[in-house]
Image (spheres, helix red, strand yellow):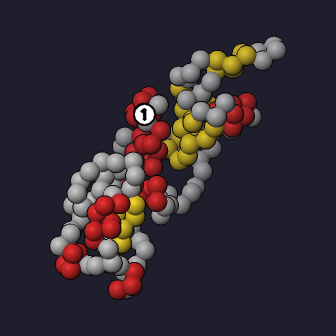
Amino acid sequence: MNEPVLVLNANFQPINVTSTYRAINLVLAEKATLILNGRGVIHSVSQTFPLPSVIRLTRMVKRPRPVVAFTRKEIFRRDNFTCQYCGKKTSKLTVDHVIPRRLGGKTNWRNVVAACPRCNHQKGGMTPEQSGMYPIKLPQNPPSSATYLFGKHLNQNNKWEDFLIGW
């Protein structure tokens, strides 16, 4: 019942990911309609309900443009779980400030990269010029596209791809 369900606005724009339990309640309350059933059914004593994979709200909901939260997990995801100095893919990553905080570097998307512990230690509190270590890819804000925002659920829900591409 905690499987992710893609929620579409009335114009089919992806706006959220919710649990199966919440999605079934929205459909039963007639606040949403079932678009895609990719998981089978759930049985109650007297009825059978489809388990939704994608639902669409019946009314248009206005909401602000989504922004990716600034967290360690999102930094690693933006950098594809790869050290930005040596290019090694690892699960043991650290966060490195390209311009160290003690030299006025900010903690934001444009100054923070994922680094393996070895590279982070080697670079230390130096600037890229002092250490000779430059990030492979310049740090930027991650895209706020629907594919990026809800793409982390795609590996288990490949049927969502049709709804995410184009927004």
Which residue is depicted at the point 28% across and 71% down? 123
Q: Nearer the viewer, residue 151 or 27?
A: 151
Outermost residue, top side:
46
Q: Three-letter amino acid code at disc 1?
A: Asn
Q: Judge left or right: residue 12 versus residue 135.
A: right
Q: Judge left or right: residue 129 versus residue 108.
A: left
Q: Nearer the viewer, residue 40 or 115?
A: 115
Q: Is residue 131 above or below residue 18?
A: below
Residue 153 visible in image: yes
Outermost residue, right side:
45
Q: Is residue 159 above or below residue 69?
A: above
The image quarter containing residue 110 is bottom left
Which residue is depicted at the point 28% across and 79% down? 126
* Image position, residue 97 (x, y; %): 36, 72
Q: Which residue is mark 1?
A: 155
* Image position, residue 20 (x, y; %): 64, 33
Which residue is depicted at the point 59% across and 17% down? 40
Q: Nearer the viewer, residue 76 or 30?
A: 76
* Image position, residue 117 (x, y; %): 35, 60
Residue 137 visible in image: no
The image quarter containing residue 76 is bottom left
Q: Judge left or right: residue 46 versus residue 131.
A: right
Q: What secondary structure is marked by label 1? A: loop
Which residue is depicted at the point 66% across and 30% down? 1
Q: Judge left or right: residue 164 versus residue 39.
A: left
Count of labels shown?
1
Q: Is residue 153 above or below residue 94?
A: above
Q: Label 1 crowding class (10 Å Cα cut-off): few <14, some 14-19, many 20+?
A: few
Q: Is residue 158 above or below residue 96?
A: above
